[in-house]
Structures are given as structure tokens and as C-alpha cells.
Amino acid sequence: QVQLVESGGGLVQAGGSLRLSCAASGRTVGVHAMGWFRQAPGKEREFVAAINTNAPRTYYGDSVKGRFTISRDNVKMTVYLTMNSLKPEDTAIYYCAASYISSASNRRSEYPYWGQGTQVTVSS
């Protein structure tokens, strides 16, 4: 099992920045893909960003490209999501996800392990 704990959410004004963290523990050997998804009230959970932990590859959803950056610290087994130029439509619960798949994916079904989520609220 892999346990994921997110932190760093909060309330920010439009145009501001936040950095989310996701710390992984447990059976993390072999976890090659970690990602961030988000879910706004009344909407489906959508892909935000993903990263390979064993190769320099990152992937982003279209709505966050150029504003968000995903990064990792393999020693700490922590993944970060730096969010800049935040917009009110970025308001959602942000979830961290992890998988043993060999390459990061934008598909929810590829990730068996999920954190509890952290709330991000962007005011206009």
C-alpha cells in the first residue's frame, strides 16, 4: 500500500500563487508515476498534471499549461504542484495520486492510490 498526504491548499486571490505538496509513504519502491487531479463542486475529477519519478517527463492538462509546474523530490518521495496566475476556475479540491505504472498518465483509472485532498479556493 501507498499512503499519500497532501498539504499546502488555502485561500488565495486571483493572480496569486500556491504550492501544493504530496508526501508518499509505505510501499513506494516501484512507484514511477505520480499525478495531481482536481474536482470542483458538481464536476468530474479532472487531470491537472503528472510526472514520472524515474525519468524527466511531465504532463499537463490543457487548462493549466503554462501556469502550473509539477516537480518531485525522489529522496523525500514528495511531489509538488506550483500554481501561478491562479484563476477562480482553479477552485477545487486537489488530489494527489500514485501508481506503479511505468509512465505517468492522465487517466484516473491508472492510479490506485489517492490522498485525501486539499482545498484550493481562488477569490476574484
Image (tube, grey):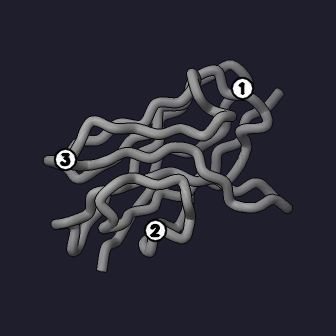
Residue at position x 85%, y 62% in the image? 42
Q: Amino acid at mark 2?
A: Tyr
Q: Please, is residue 25 above or below residue 10 in the view? A: below
Foreground label between 1 and 2: 2
The answer for how far apart the CA atoms under marks 1 and 2 are is 31 Å
- Residue where numbered disc 2 is placed: 111
In the image, taking residue 30 as reference, residue 23 lies left or right, namely: right
Residue at position x 52%, y 67% in the image? 116
Q: Amino acid at mark 3?
A: Asn
Q: Are marks 3 and 2 in contact (CB under 8 Å)?
A: no
Q: Residues within 10 Å of mark 1 (few under 14, many from 20)?
A: some
- Residue where numbered disc 1 is placed: 13
Query: Helix, strand or loop at disc 1?
Result: strand
Q: Please, is residue 45 above or below residue 76 in the view? A: below
- In the image, 111 versus 1, the foreground residue is 111
- Residue where numbered disc 3 is placed: 74
